[in-house]
Amino acid sequence: MANETTLTKPAAEEAAAAEHTRSGRFYRPHVDILEQPDELLVMADVPGARGDRIDVKFEDGSLSIHAEVDPRQSDDREYLLREYGVGDFYRTFRVSEAVDAGKISAEYADGVLTLHLPKAEAVRPRKIAVKTE
Amino acid sequence: MVFRYRNTRHPMHQLRDEMDRLLTGFLGQPSGGPWPGVGRGHPAVNLWEDADAMIVELEVPGVKKDQIDISVVGDELSLKIERPDPTPEDVTYHRRERPVGAFGRVLRLPADVDAGRVEAELSDGVLTITLPKAENAKPRKIEVVSA
C-alpha cells in the first residue's frame, strides 16, 4: 500500500516525459555537483541499486541517470513504519559546461554513484605565465 | 506533530516513536520539505515484523560499516550514523543536496529484542537490521488439552 505522505524520497517528475517499460514510481536521487578545475564531479545517492543496472547517458548537454531498484519486499508486506518507498531512481540535468563526452567515467560503491565529467580542453583554466623583459 | 506517522497501519506504534527527537539529526539538512515530519534530522526507516523478528531497514548511501553504531536495550533500538563530509579543496558546488554529518535515532520497537542475536547487514547503501523477538514476546500456540 503505497502512501504518498510516508515517502521521504521525492518523486522524479522528469521521468514522466521519458519512455520506460517498467511501471512504478521513480525517485529523485539527492546529488552533489562539484566543479573542480579540470572536471565536474556528480555524486548521486542511489541506495539499493546494483552497479550493473545503472544507466548513465550524456546527450546534447543533457545528463541522465537511471538506476533500477527492485522491490526488496513483496507488495503485500505490512509495515509498522513506512517512511520511504523503494523504486528506481531517475534524474536528468542540463550540463552547460563544455564536457568531453568521450571521457566521462562512472563508478559505484555503497549506494553512491560518482560520475566524472572531464571538461573539454578549450574551457580548462590555463595559467598564463607573464614574461618579464 | 505527534501524528507524524498517521498513515502507517498500526496506530499503536505511532506514539511510541517520539524519542527520536532527543537526538540530533543530519547537520545542515534543510527542514521541512513536501512531507512534513520526515527528512528533518533523522534518517527515515521502514519497520516490519514477522512472527520471530522485527526488521528495520534504512537507506544510508555512502556510509561505511564502521560509521554505524547500533545498540539495543529491551525494546529500544538506538542508531548512530556518521556520514563524513569529504569536501575536497578548491571546488565550487553547483548542487549540494546529500546530507552529511552525524545523525541518530531511537526507535521503540513493538516487542522486546533478544539482543544477543541481532544481526545487521549493509549492502549497496541499504542497512537491514534483524531483531529477533525475545522469547517472552513471541506468539505462542496454546494447545487445548481435553480432560
Image (cartoon, coloured by chain):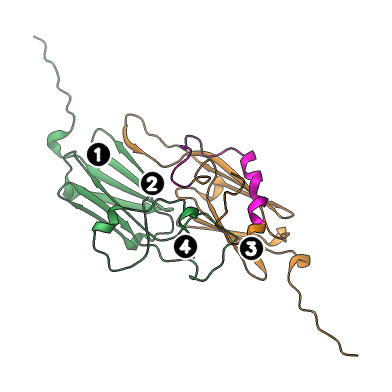
Chain colours: A green, B orange
- Disc 3 versus disc 4: nearer the observer: 4
Q: Residue furthest right?
A: B147
Q: Are marks 2 and 1 on the same chain?
A: yes
Asked whether residue B71 appears in the rendered view, the answer is no
- Disc 2 versus disc 4: nearer the observer: 4
The boundaries of the magenta stretch are B13-35
**A32 relative to A52, above or below:** above
The type of residue carrying mark 1 is: Glu
- Where residue B26 sits in the image (x, y, percent)? 51, 39
The type of residue carrying mark 2 is: His
**Residue behind mark 2:** A30
**Residue behind mark 3:** B54
Asked whether residue A47 appears in the rendered view, the answer is yes
Is residue B24 magenta-colored? yes
Picture residue at 14% right of the left edge, 37% below the top: A121
Q: Which mark is residue A39?
A: 1
**A120 relative to A114, above or below:** above
- Where residue B24 sits in the image (x, y, percent)? 59, 37
Picture residue at 13% right of the left edge, 16% below the top: A130
The type of residue carrying mark 4 is: Ala
Q: Residues within 10 Å of mark 1 (few under 14, many from 20)?
A: many
Circle 1 sits in a helix, a strand or a loop, which is it?
Answer: strand
> Which one is in front, B105 or A14?
A14
Which is more N-terminal, label 1 or label 2? 2
Tell which subunit mark 3 falls on. Answer: B
Q: Going by the image, does B73 lie left or right of B32? A: right
Which is more N-terminal, label 4 or label 1? 4
Q: Going by the image, does A5 lie left or right of A11? A: right
**Residue behind mark 4:** A2
Q: How many marks?
A: 4
Q: Going by the image, does A121 lie left or right of A47? A: left
